[in-house]
Image: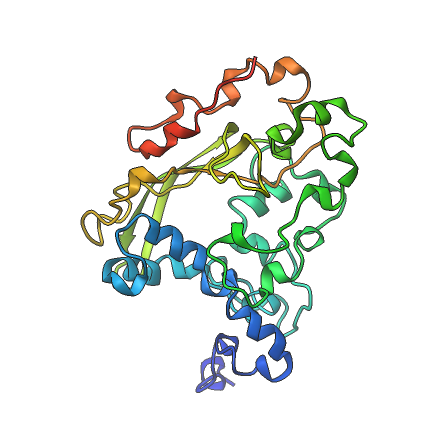
Amino acid sequence: MDKDAAHTGMQPYPSRDLQGICYQCHAGVTDTFADSIHYNLHGMQNGLMAFSHDSLLSDSPHHDEIFDKNCIACHATCGDCHVSRPKVFTGGLIDQHNFFGTPPMDQTCFGCHGARNAGEFMGTVGFRGDVHFEMGMTCMDCHPVNNFHGTGEVNDSMWTKSELPSCYDCHDDQRPGQSELQVHNIHGDSLSCQVCHAQANNNCFECHVEYNEDQTGLGSTSTVRLMFRIGKNPIQSESRPYEYVTLRHIPTYVDSFEVVGPDLLPNYDDISNWKYSPTHNIQRITFQNESCDACHGNEKIFLREEDLLESDSKANWNLIPVVPQ
């Protein structure tokens, strides 16, 4: 039988309707998933609108178009993890029509996050993978299921999620003041764990979007550089009190969306495009923790004026730290 004829009239993405087929058996999961960041992409929506003078996508046709034709590609449904690969990756069924209770990390997590956290974790991006991956661990060993399915709460970004992983979940004995390693006690909460234990990460610069041939989508291109930079903490809070953190440059810049309309990022210089980065390529021994002098006085690993591009946000200047001596 002809494949196209056999599938005529069938719904190609049945899990898009959260009150549909999945709901019949998994109502509790689909109810919370509706408000999860994986499904509604609130983090991306709010991140985009923070650059504008409008609060909601519905207030700005241009931003709504950008989100609908570019950002929405990262939107996930139940099927994108549990039976098929994400469309933004390669799409297609993972193993015919077999469902996976725990999605295979290399087919699903990597599909959306492979250029950054998942790729760095698995060692396909950068120098060496994460020590936890080398020990056989997966994303799900650190991230509880509610990080994916949601809790029913609406989060403005991933940083407002409850129960985000912490190194102390497994390494509670390494808290400042409790560790047998004096270096942990001396530095206290002034450093995130990644400052000493992460490696170089992927950084993207000067993203441009362009319409595809039929104007139904917006593709993007950017420059990518592997870098390691420590800077001031841009989201300092009670749960993240660190003064120094690892940073990652995001691709957005003031002219990223000029093909859609003029002056779409009027707040560009108010928001840094170097961001807090809990880089997922941890190793116990790294080049910056081999000795005190590998970090102290080593200007090359700290965000510096010469790292800032002419096209960068002026807010990045606030993240340049004093290099410890």
Q: Position of residue 36 (x, y in %)?
A: 52, 64
- Residue found at x 34% / y 59%: 67
Quadrant the C terminus occupies: top right
Residue 51, image x, y percentages: 31, 47
Q: Residue drawn at (45%, 55%), measured in percent from left and top?
A: 43
Give the percent coordinates (x, y) of residue 320: 43, 25
Query: With 227 as the anchor, is 104 left or right in this view?
Result: right
Query: For this view, does 240 lie left or right of residue 69?
Result: right
Furthest toward the right, the residue is: 180
Of all residues shown, which one is farthest toward the left?
262
Q: Residue at x 46, y 56 (%)?
A: 156
Which of these two is toward me, 97 or 157?
157
Q: Is residue 211 above or below residue 3?
A: above
Please indicate, yes or no, whether residue 23 appears anywhere in the rendered image.
Answer: yes
Q: Quadrant of residue 23?
A: bottom right
- 166 lies above or below 35: above
Determine if residue 215 is in view: no
Between 54 and 94, the residue placed more toward the observer is 54
Given residues 174 and 226, the one toward you in this image is 174
Is 229 on the left or on the right of 215, as rendered? right
Residue 109: quadrant of the picture: bottom right
Taking the image as shown, residue 166 lies to the left or right of residue 299, namely right
Rendered image quadrant of residue 252:
top left
Colour pattern = rainbow
User: In the rendered image of this protein, does residue 228 appear above or below residue 269?
Assistant: above
Taking the spot 50% from the left edge, 63% from the top edge, the residue there is 154
Residue 292 in the image: x percent, y percent?
66, 15
Q: How many marks?
A: 0
